[in-house]
Image: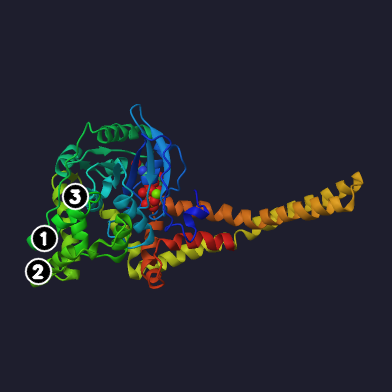
Amino acid sequence: MGLTNSSIGIRAAASELEIKKQAVEDKVVALAGNPNVGKSTVFNGLTGMNQHTGNWPGKTVTNAQGYCATKQQSYVMVDIPGTYSLMAHSAEEEVARNFICFGQPDAVVVVCDATCLERNLNLVLQTLEISSRVVVCVNLMDEAKRKNIKIDLSAIAKRLGVPVVSTVAREKKSLDGLMNTLDNVVSGAVMPTPAQVVYPDAVERAIAKIEPLVRKKTDSLASRWLSLKLLDPDPSLTLEINKFLGEDFLRSPELADALAAAKTELLADGIGPDALKDLIVSTLVSAAEKICRGTVVCEKAQYDAFDRRVDHILTSKATGYPIMLLLLALIFWLTITGANYPSQMLSGALFALQDRLTLLFHAWGAPEWLHGMLVLGVYRVLAWVISVMLPPMAIFFPLFTLLEDAGYLPRVAYNLDRPFKRCCACGKQSLTMCMVSIILH
Ligand SMILES: Nc1nc2c(ncn2[C@@H]2O[C@H](COP(=O)(O)OP(=O)(O)OP(=O)(O)O)[C@@H](O)[C@H]2O)c(=O)[nH]1
Ligand SMILES: [Mg+2]
């Protein structure tokens, strides 16, 4: 675990990453993907670093960089926070979106969860709208195998128009294929031709109206994607676009007029701002569905029936909350009350040793100030800290890890998302709060 001030501090998500290449020919690669799909595990496997990993979403909240090299090429890998889409809803999703959209990486690896590939393709399709140098890394293949899910990777690659590789990120050897493919993409030996999502006619007409003007204004951002974003404005994204381009490019009267005309036409077709958002999302969802049709096969149609039943019990209103409260209360009780016994034993033993040390110092004829400083100062404080802090941590963290391995923590995050949202936070922060409350206790 690598919880540092830079990764959890108040400015963590907002901080921008300065890419530090070791050599000018280094290629910058973004590791993007949905939360909890193994991006940091891939990153650690490739770079030998120790980014925070764990079985719940939202561990990585800021970008991190590391280095790796193949025989052909050296890379700066950038581990970015998980995001379900490029329409960012939280600070860390903004960090991810900003790096993919404006970080100008030489390639983007979109790490996907093989057990729910269709849902993950939503982000893949959005990334393809921005960059053509994309490699799709279908991770957690061992889990897919366990669930009897068969994936025809080459058929998916054909439909997406970009290379698709499979990995089991916990096994470093399986990352070789990813790096070979990455070599081919960044060297130009493989030229991806990304599939383009086709939106309903009215939206396509609106894009066509403004895209030529957008293209005239900038060639560093994908004009089709940018046109779509102008039709469906997101204030934080508009701000980033202006920052990137160094101008408020909507001030161009020609573009502003064309945009107003396109929006009026959309409205005439009955497509207001909310309907446009829905249309974009539903088009992406059905495109992902089409790609997975026939290429992702679950041999057991009800392969996840048991998981779903357990999920329902753990996350439904009637049973989810009582179970969660009981479990968390039990863990806190075990940690707080249970720790009293080892705490007492430890403090008894450590303070008995303090008396011995005092006798020893007196027998040596050590001056009182030395005894006061070393025994009554340094040793006593250490003894207090160890006997108070060690037992609760030794109980809490293994129990928390047990819940994590069982996959229960994402359910806690899900259950608490709604109440946390009311306080302008999100459910996954509850997990950090649990850890912090034990540390503070
Ligand atoms: N079985 C299996 N587990 C994996 C694999 N790759 C990663 N994991 C596990 O999946 C969990 C999530 O991995 P992370 O690397 O933390 O995921 P992430 O995408 O960085 O997550 P966020 O930063 O929260 O978005 C961890 O418990 C990993 O050990 C894999 O190929 N197979
Ligand atoms: Mg991560």
Left or right of 78, for residue 352: right
| Mark 2 lies on residue | 265
Q: Are circles 2 and 3 on residues that touch, CB within 8 Å?
A: no
Instruction: Classify 369 as above or below 150.
Output: below
Which one is in front, 317 or 228? 228
What type is the residue that disc 3 sits on? Ala
Residue 66 percent across, percent down from the top left: 43, 40
Residue occupying the point 67% across, 56% down: 385
Of pointers 2 and 3, the one earlier in the residue sequence: 2
Task: In the displayed orientation, state which residue is furthest to the front.
Answer: 253
Q: How would you rate the neighbour count of disc 3 (Cα within 10 Å): few for under 14, some for 14-19, many for 20 or more? A: few
Specify the color scheme: rainbow
Is label 2 in contact with label 1 (beta carbons under 8 Å)? yes
Q: Which residue is mark 1?
A: 209
The quadrant of the image that shows the C terminus is bottom right
Q: Quadrant of residue 75?
A: top left
The residue where tag 3 is placed is 301
Q: How far, Cα to Cα, is label 2 from label 1?
A: 10 Å
At numbered mark 2, what does the secondary structure look like: helix, strand or loop?
A: helix
Q: Is residue 278 visible?
A: no
Report which quarter residue 342 is drawn in.
bottom right
Q: Secondary structure at mark 1?
A: helix
Q: Nearer the viewer, residue 4 or 113?
A: 4
Q: Position of residue 249 (x, y in %)?
A: 25, 61
Query: Relative to 319, is 57 above or below?
Result: above
| Numbered badge on residue 132 | none
> Mark 1 or 3 closer to N-term?
1
Across and down, in percent, residue 396 comes to: 54, 56
